[in-house]
Image (tube, rainbow, N blue to C red):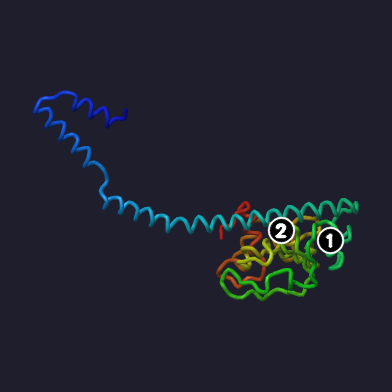
Amino acid sequence: MGGGGNLLSSCCKAFTLAEGTTCVATLEDNRFSAFTLAEVLVTLGIIGVVSAMTVPSLMQNYQRQSYVTQLHKVYNEYSQALVAYQNDKNALNLTEAGLNSSNAIAEFIKSYFKIVKECDSMDNCFADSYKTLKGTEYTTYSRDVKSFVLASGASIRPSYSKEGNKISNVGIDINGKKGPNILGRDFIFFAVYNSGLIDDFIENGDAPLDKDDRENRFNQQCNAGAEGNGWGCFGKILNDNWQMTY
């Protein structure tokens, strides 16, 4: 039997009048040691306030990590496809392998990815519009780019865009047309370099970018204080070890 039963047994087995008074007093003390209704309500109120403060933050962090997990899958798939493409061509770099035009990039996608939909532009493969982290409409990008929907559900729009050692820009909506359709959340850009490396974009530079270059690009073009042109978000995620900390 639990502690309460032992107390009752030891107190009330046999007793004198004086002892009986002590027993009743002990039971009354035990009875009044329980929480009152007011105390329970106050406790529940505190729990409710704490939950209201922490649960939204936990949900937000979970959603952000979900975006990063899906982005990482596309990144790995794209990176592995670039390696396979270069090896299949016995080439030293992607340009030598033949990845030197928009048509070549489209053929690369169709040959090395599982495609469920092909679009002549972003229309029908991507959402109709996107916003920046600042909440403004995202307009500084071209929608007139051949796009694809992968078997994973991600939408990609790879374009040939040679600048220095960068040969391609790739826009990815990791969950297709589904929301929130925000640049830097579910819509991310990365750059493909001639070496086959994937990173953020830097003018007249090469991959891998150093942390300072990525951070500067993020502050200038991705974070909530910037208008956003598509760059800087991916580099920030790389800098923070595949975490979306912004």
Q: Which residue is mark 1?
A: 110
Tell me which residue sits at (66%, 71%) in the image: 229
Indicate the position of residue 83 as horizontal and vertical percent values: 82, 52
Q: Label for residue 73?
A: none
Q: Amino acid at mark 2?
A: Asp
- Picture layout, residue 143 above or below residue 105: below
Residue 85, picture quadrant: bottom right
Neighbour class for label 1 at 10 Å: few (<14), some, many (≥20)? some
At a point 18% along the width and 38% down the height, the residue shown is: 28
Q: Answer yes or no: do the residues labelled 2 and 1 have beta carbons within 8 Å?
A: no
In the rendered image, which quarter contains the C terminus? bottom right
Choose mark 2 or mark 1, whichever is in front: 1
Tell me what residue is drawn at x 64 percent, y 64 percent. Answer: 217
Horizontal arrangement in the rendering, residue 11 relative to residue 225 (left or right) = left
Q: Which mark is residue 199?
A: 2
Question: Where, by quadrant of the figure, is residue 72 drawn?
Answer: bottom right
Give neighbour class at mark 2: few <14, some 14-19, many 20+ (Cα, 10 Å). Answer: many
Helix, strand or loop at disc 1? helix
- Distance between the Cα atoms at labels 2 and 1? 22 Å
Secondary element at tag 2: strand
210 shown above or below 13: below
